[in-house]
């Protein structure tokens, strides 16, 4: 009789197309290592905004009439240990729905669960399929808890971790304990990520690539190479890898008055066929037309940086700050039209009112455009997410608060409110109030 655990392992091996037995290095206790893992999550987000003031609208504008939208996704996280230091994961997912106004009209879009594409009927896709190897460099042994895309086991404090395959750049870079997961904490794009980090991705936010992380005592160095899409906001990634992104990040870990914190400095360079806002404006003036970066694309590079701080202030209270900047002379490619961004917020557990597994969060964001980008959108240009046909520029200012209530084991219901002044940097439109309800199950 084959045990239930053995049957599950055989099923995973079949699913992943693998053969053979799991090999363990000498000295490793098999009882300490999780041989396989299987987790599931379901998230449904409903959002709406009432009507707001808008004297004009463009092709990429947020609908000024009262609107609502709903998105859902169901994900399987299936992993198999190949050896004591390596594992492979696959994440098939079923998605459904669109973001408000087809995910257009706000640079710091209000739902991280809304992609740049969607469908009314459920559709299947594969966001992640990756291999991870962790090489021990010694130091204290630490327990790794079982979680989605992470097998439980023992890991040395000093190590090198290689990740290779299809995943999201922000699975590895720009992470933050308090603002990074739109399924569980904040929802706004420019809160859960550094707004000016134009990370390589397809229209769903995933790509092919590799990253290496070197961890020693109080610091980690990360580096990665990732594939960019064929053209901005595309569902297809460049099959030749000639359009790509280099990313590097330095992380230091510290204690402040006995409370842990992390500070990360990220740098990235995108190499792709991208259009200059200045070139698009110059061509438009010669042809007496509306500027379009698609007409002036050429091989170019676009650098950027981001600073990311997370700090525990008390056992139930944490704070975060992100500041980011990129070269605003070129068009946004794979994320959104933000050339500089500053965000900060607090995350409070419900211990003080007897609800330990509840969380309250509050964040504020200011997003900005470069002078070249302002001129382009003022002349009627369109981008990935924004384009009102004209522009009375002002920084896009966002407030977000949420309360996540644990309704039952593995089930959380979140109530989310966002206030957006000058959506798409346009002082002539808005402000807009967004109301959201999120149902999240994970096991």
Image (tube, grey):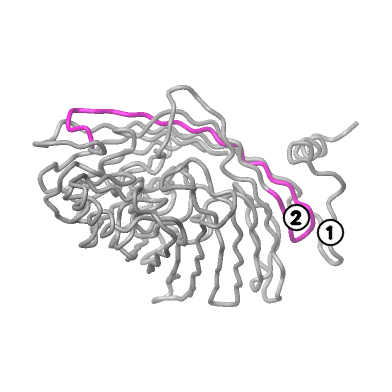
Separation (CA) of disc 2 from disc 1: 9 Å
Q: Which residue occupies 55% across, 73% down?
A: 221
Magenta stretch: dominant secondary structure: strand
| Along the viewing direction, whichever of 98 and 148 lies nearer the viewer | 98
Work out whether 238 lies above or below 71: below
Apparent side of residue 159 relative to residue 284 in the rendered image (left or right): right
Apparent side of residue 23 relative to residue 206 in the rendered image (left or right): right
Indicate the position of residue 83 as horizontal and vertical percent values.
Answer: 79, 56
Q: Which residue is mark 2?
A: 33
Indicate the position of residue 181 as horizontal and vertical percent values.
Answer: 44, 49
The answer to which image quadrant residue 434 occupies is top left
Give, as a single range, the part of the protein colored magenta. Answer: 62-88
Badge number at residue 320: none
Name the N-terminal-most of marks 2 and 1.
1
> How many neighbours does mark 1 have within 10 angstroms: few (below 14), some (14-19), or many (20 or more)?
some
Q: Which residue occupies 54% across, 54% down?
A: 227
Work out whether 228 lies above or below 44: below
Apparent side of residue 391 relative to residue 410 in the rendered image (left or right): left
| Along the viewing direction, whichever of 181 and 414 lies nearer the viewer | 181
Badge number at residue 24: 1
- In the picture, the quarter occupied by the N terminus is top right
The answer to which image quadrant residue 38 occupies is top right
Apparent side of residue 226 relative to residue 308 in the rendered image (left or right): right
Farthest residue, direction right: 1
Q: Which residue occupies 60% across, 72% down?
A: 215
- Visible residue check, residue 222: yes
Indicate the position of residue 210 as horizontal and vertical percent values.
Answer: 61, 59
| Along the viewing direction, whichever of 283 and 132 lies nearer the viewer | 283
- Visible residue check, residue 409: no
């Amino acid at each position: 009789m084959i045990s239930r655990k053995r049957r599950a392992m055989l099923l995973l091996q079949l699913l992943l197309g693998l053969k053979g037995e799991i090999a363990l290095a000498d000295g490793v206790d098999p009882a300490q290592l999780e041989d396989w893992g299987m987790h599931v999550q379901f998230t449904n987000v409903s959002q709406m905004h009432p009507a707001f003031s808008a004297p004009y609208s463009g092709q990429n504008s947020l609908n000024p009439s009262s609107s609502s939208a709903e998105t859902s996704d169901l994900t399987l996280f299936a992993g198999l240990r190949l050896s004591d230091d390596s594992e492979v994961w696959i994440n098939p997912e079923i998605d459904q729905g669109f973001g408000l106004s087809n995910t257009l009209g706000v640079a710091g879009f209000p739902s991280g669960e809304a992609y740049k594409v969607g469908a009314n009927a459920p559709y299947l896709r594969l966001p992640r399929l990756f291999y991870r190897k962790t090489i021990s460099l010694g130091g204290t042994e630490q327990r790794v808890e079982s979680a989605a895309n992470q097998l439980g086991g023992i890991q040395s404090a000093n190590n090198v971790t290689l990740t290779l395959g299809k995943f999201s750049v922000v699975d590895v870079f720009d992470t933050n304990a308090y603002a990074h997961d739109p399924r569980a904490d904040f929802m706004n794009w420019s809160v859960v990520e550094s707004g000016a980090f134009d990370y390589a991705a397809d229209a769903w936010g995933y790509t092919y690539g590799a990253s290496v992380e070197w961890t020693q005592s109080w610091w980690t160095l990360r580096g990665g190479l990732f594939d960019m899409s064929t053209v901005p906001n595309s569902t297809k990634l460049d099959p030749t890898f000639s359009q790509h992104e280099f990313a590097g990040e330095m992380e230091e870990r510290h204690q402040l008055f006995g409370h842990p914190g992390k500070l990360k400095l990220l740098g990235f360079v995108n190499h792709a066929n991208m259009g200059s806002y200045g070139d698009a404006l110059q061509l438009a003036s010669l042809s007496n037309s509306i500027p379009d970066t698609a007409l002036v694309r050429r091989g170019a590079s676009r650098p950027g940086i981001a600073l990311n701080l997370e700090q525990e202030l008390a056992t139930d209270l944490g704070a975060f700050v992100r500041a980011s900047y990129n070269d605003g002379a070129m068009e946004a490619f794979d994320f959104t039209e933000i050339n500089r961004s500053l965000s900060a917020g607090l995350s409070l557990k419900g211990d003080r009112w007897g609800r330990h597994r509840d969380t309250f969060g509050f964040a504020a964001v200011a997003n900005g455009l470069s002078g070249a980008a302002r001129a382009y959108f003022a002349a009627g240009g369109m981008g990935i997410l924004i384009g009102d046909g004209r522009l009375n520029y002002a920084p896009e200012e966002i407030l977000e608060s949420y309360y996540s209530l644990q309704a039952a084991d593995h089930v959380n219901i979140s109530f989310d409110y966002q206030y957006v002044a000058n959506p798409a940097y346009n002082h002539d439109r808005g402000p807009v109030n967004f109301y959201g309800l999120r149902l999240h199950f994970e096991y």
